[in-house]
Amino acid sequence: MGFDVLLNAIWMVFSSGSAIYVLLGVMLGLCFGVIPGLGGTTALALLIPVTFTMDSLDAMYLAGGVMGATSFGGSITAILINTPGTAPNAATTFDGYPLSKQGKAGMAIGAAATASALGGILGLFTLLLVIPLAKELVLAFGPSEFFLLTVLGLVAIAVSARGKLLRGLIAGGFGLMLAFVGSDTVSGEIRFALGSDYLWDGIPLVPTLTGMFALSQMIELALKGGSVAAMGEEAKTRISGVWDGTKAVFVHWTVLLRGSAIGTIIGAIPGLGGTVASFIAYTSAVQASRDPSSFGKGNIVGVIAPESANNAKDGGSLVPTVAFGIPGSAETALFLGILVLHGIDPGPSILLQNEREVYGLIVALTLSAIGASLLGLIFARWLVMITYVNVHFLVPVVVTVSLTGVYVLDGRPGDVILAIIMGIIGYLMIRFDYPRLTLVIALVLGETAERSFHQTRQISDGEILSYMAARPQSLILIVLTLLTLFLPALRRRRARRAEPRTQ
Amino acid sequence: MKNALARGLAAAVLVTASAGAALAEWPEQPITFVVPYSPGGGFDAYARAVAPEMEKILGTEVVIENIPGAGGQKGAATVYRAEPDGYTIGIWNVPGLTVPQLLGRSSGYDLSDVTWIGNLATSKYALAVQPDSEFESLEDLCSQGEPFKHSDTGPASTSSVTARIAMSLIDCPIQNITGYKGSTDTIVGLMRGEVDATIKPIASLRKYADSGDVEILMTFEDEPSMEGVPTATELGYPDFANFDLRRIVGGPPGIPADIQEKLSSALIEAANSEAVQEWSENAGRPLDPVGAAEASQIMSNLMDFYSTYKDVLEQ
């Protein structure tokens, strides 16, 4: 097993003093995570040239430190100002922000920190367990499974918009429309690019997310005035709240396990990512709960589920990497880019030839998940103060920093304009109560859905259903999708039947 | 009148002096080196390998800028539209970019105008199947009674172009399964059994062959570069060796000849430097640097070669 190698790698981090790079990475990751619009991919992309002069192992420590910290960093702003620092933290706002408004921000942060750390560890632990099977796992999931997973994701969106089903579907439909802008995956034709080459590859995700979540929220806060949390909350409640949050994760350990499992699995599938993972973890927690209507109003489980998933995905996303040296996510693609820069050519033998770099990354990710959460817990008390800052200071700072972050990513003014447009659309969605996350998930899934569907069609020579029926992986996904679709209706019927007895 | 004349003379002197000064002192600013793909790929690797050496040689920063999109067309268009002052150059996805241009669907660039600076490497292709595949030769693939399935990233990718033209030369029916996100994904698609075979650069396939995950049936070369693997020429397909993938560097049309020369010699010197040669060894990336004149010749031969197959590409 790889455990002796792992222990050796852990020993190496501390004995060589290179642990400093992990710490640097953690602090960088936290900063980039907290700032809405910046995230793990931006941080790593900016780091690539910096790592050129470093030893490849130290570069891995730095990259791992960054990767493991951004998901927790993003939860802080998600909870405190309803603005996810990174897209995978969007689901954390559903219950994290209501908790802040009730003065329980400390508890939410404590729960997020603990769930992130444990979720990250569980994800990496799972990765180590499956290393011997990695190749088979990667080969088991092909275009038909990718397509069915996107269908599952879209169904989950539809189902989750309880009470505003129509608005959820409209938002999702609009998201799909946006996803189809850009070059067709099969013929290469450019669609809806409106004459400029900015949209050739479709609507870029980062400016859209920044606009839709960060800017729209800032517009809302600015118009509302005041500060996030109501005045006059007791300081004592805030601080002790942090430990309540930590304890809650252990009380709801099933949620933690389920969220981590979902995060790891979805992380291992290329093209889905942390946003989808955290969203599906959230909706499955809602469905599995005995009191689904308490979500969205400050149920701590609504923080635990997505936060464990968006850290567990880091472990999952390394499965294709250890199997074939290929990326499982945008961040792992950049991590591999760092290796290429150091003259390493990642391939199927990456574990044989570059064992120390891969295990170095795994160790750094583990330490980072723990370290970022510890730092978060220590500074929770001060972080919570942000909820008491007046919006006249908060809004301009966040808007400026977010737009700068969007511009820094690719240096295109179009990105900034897009972010502003999305910000306005996002604000209108807030005002008229349309779910923004639904639109975003549909946008993320749309491209993969279309591409995988056409691939499946071509591979199966048009006999799509019989092709899927012959694959157990596909059948399982079809069953899961049907369950997701009909389970809520079944439960409602069971609940209605139970009612006469209580009257 | 005298005033105007004096002013005119002063202006003329200033312009000449500054033009002369500019040429004599180039480079005075950082140079942007555009890579038309996201970081971590083959083109990116070559650019990032030579850039630091070019910095030392030219005495100015050489900054890599990744502009991915539309199969390399976005990066190409960005370089094509830049000022021809030698401060923007790029690495071009060739012959991939020839396809949209030949079919009249390209926008933003014209390969026949580009100021070519040098070619870093020429990669040859190979044909791979699954390790325990029922197909033991190209004939097996072609005699199935239906087109064999081939994985690639899209109709403008060099692998798709090579596959379609090569198979048309021997009347072998082929079906291109596209939509894969990158060339690595096309190889994974082969491993999963979604397709029967794939044609990719030797450097990309080699590591999968070494680990036993794919089997290479033949390389499209005249001289064998892989032990135990026959060349297409040996097996009776000499035309296949004409297909190759270039790592060619160029700038916008109209770069002054002396700046082109400086860029070209800097590029070649960088490619021949000890650091880059070592990188090439370790990373398994071939290097065969040639300068501006040869690069321009390569490009015009290439355009002629692919234009003869226009009708195949149009399908």
Image (spheres, coloured by chain):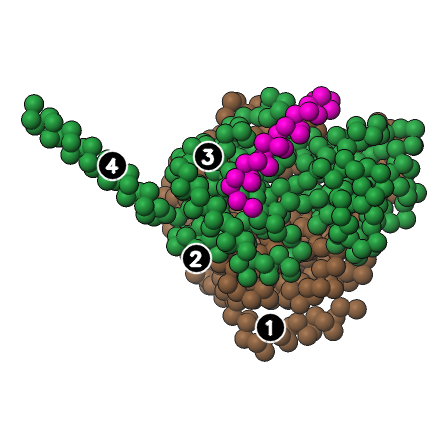
Q: Counting residues from the N terminus, which is met first, the one under dot 3 or under dot 2?
A: 2
Q: Which residue is mark 4?
A: B16
Q: Are marks 2 and 4 in contact (CB under 8 Å)?
A: no
Q: Secondary structure at mark 1?
A: helix
Which amino acid is tagged 3?
Pro
Between the C-alphas of marks 3 and 1, the distance is 47 Å
Between the C-alphas of marks 4 and 1, the distance is 60 Å
Q: Which residue is depicted at the point 66% across and 30% down?
A: B305
Read off the chain for label 4.
Answer: B
Horizontal and vertical percent for residue B3?
7, 28
Q: Which residue is mark 3?
A: B252
Q: Counting residues from the N terminus, which is met first, the one under dot 2 or under dot 4?
A: 4
Q: Is residue A304 above or below residue A142?
A: below
Q: Which residue is depicted at the point 64% across and 60% down?
A: B282
Which amino acid is tagged 4?
Thr
Question: Where, by quadrant of the figure, is residue B164 drawn?
Answer: top right
Q: Chain B appears what colour?
A: green
Q: Which residue is mark 1?
A: A13
The span picked out in magenta is: B290-315
